[in-house]
Image (cartoon, rainbow, N blue to C red):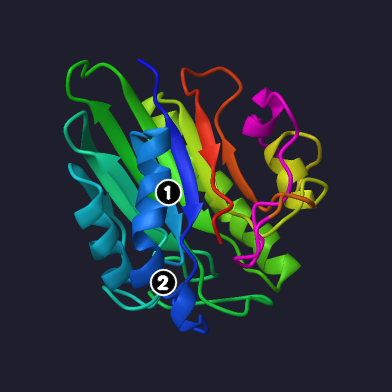
Amino acid sequence: MKLPVMTFNLRTESGTSAKHAWESRSERAAEVIRQFGPLLLGTQEGSRSMLELLKEKLKGFRYIGQGRDGGTNGEYSAIFYDSSLLDVVEEGQFWLSEQPDVPGSKSWDAAFPRICTWAQFQSIEQPAHQWLVFNTHLDHIGQQAREEGILLIAGAIGRMRAHTGLPAVLMGDLNAAPDNPVIRFLCGEVTLKGYKMQLRNAFEAAAARPGATYHNFEGGEEGEPIDYILPPRRSGLVRCRLSGAR
């Protein structure tokens, strides 16, 4: 079974003009999502109200996750899924800090609390087909926070894969260009603190090298991506879509 996945930074409403308020652009965002038809969608920067409005527009989709400040407070790194085709077997969330179980916690040089939402999904029609999915938003300021955060995520992926034997895909806004040690670590090019990952950058399968995935509502693709989908080297995960709609 193929599993189309997509990552989409929705851009928080904070600091946006009336022209770019979520209410006025949510339908355009939903149309982009419907156009590419993912079964799984990782979002970043969405508040509870933003996610609820998006869910209304994506009929049949549900989402998991909580705010980075705990409960419904703060930005989510939510995972939307097509509930007509997928079931959630197990789910969870942890904070990218030295206290990963403490809501709102942050460490190192992070500007804000950061989170990783994860779930084990199962095909309703083919229950033997299951996947682990991780969605995150790394810090936009602190390189140490990005590196320590990705090590926490890598550890979680390793433990859950060892326990379940399932393939895992990581996606999200990593706030890092392709030459950043965080991306190179995930792709197996360098080690961090003696650890090494071996994921595949979905850009490798692209017909043309993607450009920037962030443009501040001004359009254009010149530059480097900061948003990624990273499935394992051997996997049935295909048809990845990264949105640059912010």
Query: Is residue 27 or residue 229 the one in the foreground?
Result: 27
Q: Which residue is drawn at 32% across and 68% down?
A: 50
| Residue 2, above or below 7 | above
How many numbered circles are shown?
A: 2
Q: What element carries label 2?
A: loop
Which image quarter holds the N terminus? top left
| Residue 32, above or below 72 | above
Residue 74 x/y as whole percent? 38, 77
Q: Which residue is drawn at 63% across and 76% down?
A: 110
Kindly identify which numbered label has been placed on residue 42.
1
As drawn, is 243 to the left or to the right of 82? right
Choose top left, top right, bottom left or bottom right for residue 56: bottom left
- Amino acid type at image mark 2: Glu
Q: Can residue 149 be seen in this view?
A: yes
Q: Main secondary structure of the magenta part?
A: loop
- Amino acid type at image mark 1: Gly
Q: Can residue 201 be seen in this view?
A: no
Q: Which residue is drawn at 74% across and 66% down?
A: 143
Give the extent of the magenta segment.
195-219
Residue 55 x/y as whole percent? 24, 55
The numbered mark, 1 or 2, whose residue comes first in the sequence reads 1
